[in-house]
Image: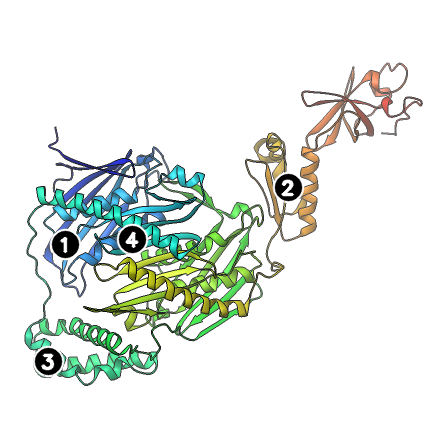
Amino acid sequence: MLNRKQYSIDVAGRPLELEISELAGRANAAVLARYGDTAILVTAVMGVKDRDTDFFPLTVDYEEKFYAVGKILGSRFVRREGRPSDEATLSGRLIDRTIRPLFDHRMRRDVHVAVTVLAYDEENDPDFPALIGASTALAISDIPWSGPVAGVKVAKINSDIAINPKIGELKKSEAKLEAFVSGLKNKINMLELSGDEAEHGEIIDAFKASQKEIKKLIEFQTKIAEEIGKEKTDVYLVEPDHETKKAVKEFLADKLEEVIYAPKDHEQHSKINTLKHELIDLLNGREFSEKQLQAVDELFEEEINELLHKKILEEEARPDGRKLDEVRALTAEAGLFKRTHGSALFIRGNTQALAMTTLGPPGAAQLVETMETTDNRRFMLHYNFPKYSVGETGSFRGPGRRDIGHGALAEKALRPLIPAQEKFPYTIRVVSEILSSNGSSSMATVCASSLSLMDAGVPLKKPAAGIAMGLILGEQKYKILTDIQGPEDHHGDMDFKVAGTADGVTAIQMDVKIEGVTIEMLEKVLEQAKKARLHILQTVNAVLASPRPELSPYAPKILTLNIDPKKIGEVIGPGGKIINGIVADTGVASIDIEEDGMVFVSGTDMSACEKAVEIIKSIVKEYRVGDIVEGTVSRIMDFGAIVDIGLNKDGMIHVSELKNGFVKNVSDVLKLGQSVRAKIIRMEDGKLSLSIKALDRSAEYEPESA
């Protein structure tokens, strides 16, 4: 029997239960978190040796397990979990971005937080208990950390703010906004928000409601840590010696400002590298030790950080000379390539995003199978960040966690603006290629993708734009920066990305390097960001104010029709024989049928699509008594003949309905393969009874020669 300690608190009318036991007993700490029937095991482990690195090595892994929801997924040959899904990667990033600012980044010990979803009830989002479990595990462990933290999901449903709404509630209603908010008692340090053109007041109300819950959850964890928490381990912190600090400060005292405040970005980058090499050469000449030289990079960055904070807080002086609320120079183009369905280039300063849109039939939608959902995704946005965009070498090895996160943010920003399938039946894929990066390529992706979609003729509800906001925090005051880049991005205290239309916000993502920010700060950031967003939208609208009226001639044509769902089997045929035959005979690219009877016929030739539609219509045609049909005699029997009227339909003519008068042998009137016209006289259980003599009862039918 396991020795257990259990703790519980009510959150949104449901108990959150934390259990600490001997499970995963070799980890520094482990917590089993339950919310509803969703169960998460979180472990925290710290390495025993310091690593020879120039960064703090923290890893957060979020593991989805298909057994958690009773699924056996994977390929036919590999029935086990593979690499994390994009959704799992984003959940891991959410936890990482919340806990990371509260570590002392001078640590050089590996810290690994592993989140394993053991059970998922399809109603309670695992992200909430996962974050609380991670925070509690770190708080009670001997790993040095300045938590606890907490976070909740919040949504505005109709006119109400809901904390941790159930998945079913969100599916049944259209939420004006949905967010995950986390942080400390009185500060927020991580945000993920999607909105349907949400207003600032609605967003702030959601933040305030979240912070009340966060405060309660932190007090809950603090009591647990006070009761069973371990004493924190003393670990080595990278701390350069006094002699090295003094030498670096003296050397940079009269040189650093000139370099950081260089007039052009490429000059700044070059001068920084040159100055750093001069510093290292100086220290080498003074015979500094290898350990002292290893500290130079960190000291160099500290001096830049100190200079940047001082100049901006005291003089409002930014490295490139812009005002605090000024956006860099903007350029945009659309329709760059003839063969693509849509294309656009957006440039802000030295950041360049090239977005390409491809339209496909409904069958091209991505099948997404994860622990949480099985769905067809008809709008996809993929983000690529090649090494050359920052002047580095390196192979293309697929998207990393950062690339997945940036692409998801841009997709989230545009998703509310994508037309419904009923209005625009295409599958839509946008790919953003970052050609050059110096600050917020994800927000440049929003702008470029918005233009690319409109260039492709996608009836986007409105154009969207995005901007990255920064913060420089001092002891008594702070300054908000619009359109951060370069040193401001690297040494600033906040990265707040916000995207939306002229009428509201569609996406927000925030990370901080400090403990957190206040709601008062966030209100000011939103207002300053709106001014920038409207300014950027002027550039977007000057290129394309609305979607192009026609699609590219290279885009597939799609025709739609509705059929009775009961007739779907007739169109598909046994083993797909009928539908595959239509595709082969007409030359269309594909025919996709939804469960509700919606049929999509796509291809490059409109006449071929129209022909396929007519064939489908004839298959599902509802015959009535009295209708005249045409067909060929496919079978002759003693009591009548079977007439094939096409596309898996036939009817029978009884011998008594062949002609006026007595007919001894059917073959005296009809021959195999003969074309005939007949009238439907009865319908029973879908079977047709035909009559030739009913066409004209006043005259005998003269059969055509076989």
Residue 244: horizontal and vertical position, in percent? 9, 76
- Residue drawn at x 10%, y 76% is 245
Q: Considering only order in the chain, which callout, 4 or 1, is on the residue closer to the N terminus?
A: 4
Please report contact status of discs 1 and 4: CB closer than 8 Å, yes or no: no
Mark 2 surroundings within 10 Å by alpha-carbon count, few (fewer than 14), some (14 through 19), many (20 or more)? few
Q: In the displayed structure, would residue 475 be above or below residue 563?
A: below
SS class of the residue under badge 1?
A: loop
Question: Image quadrant for the C terminus?
Answer: top right
Q: Which residue type does callout 1 highlight?
A: Trp
Residue identified by numbered label 1? 145
Q: Considering only order in the chain, which callout, 3 or 2, is on the residue closer to the N terminus?
A: 3
Residue identified by numbered label 4? 93
Looking at the image, which is closer to me, 267 or 213?
Answer: 213
Question: Image quadrant for the N terminus?
Answer: top left
Residue identified by numbered label 3? 247
Please report contact status of discs 3 and 4: CB closer than 8 Å, yes or no: no
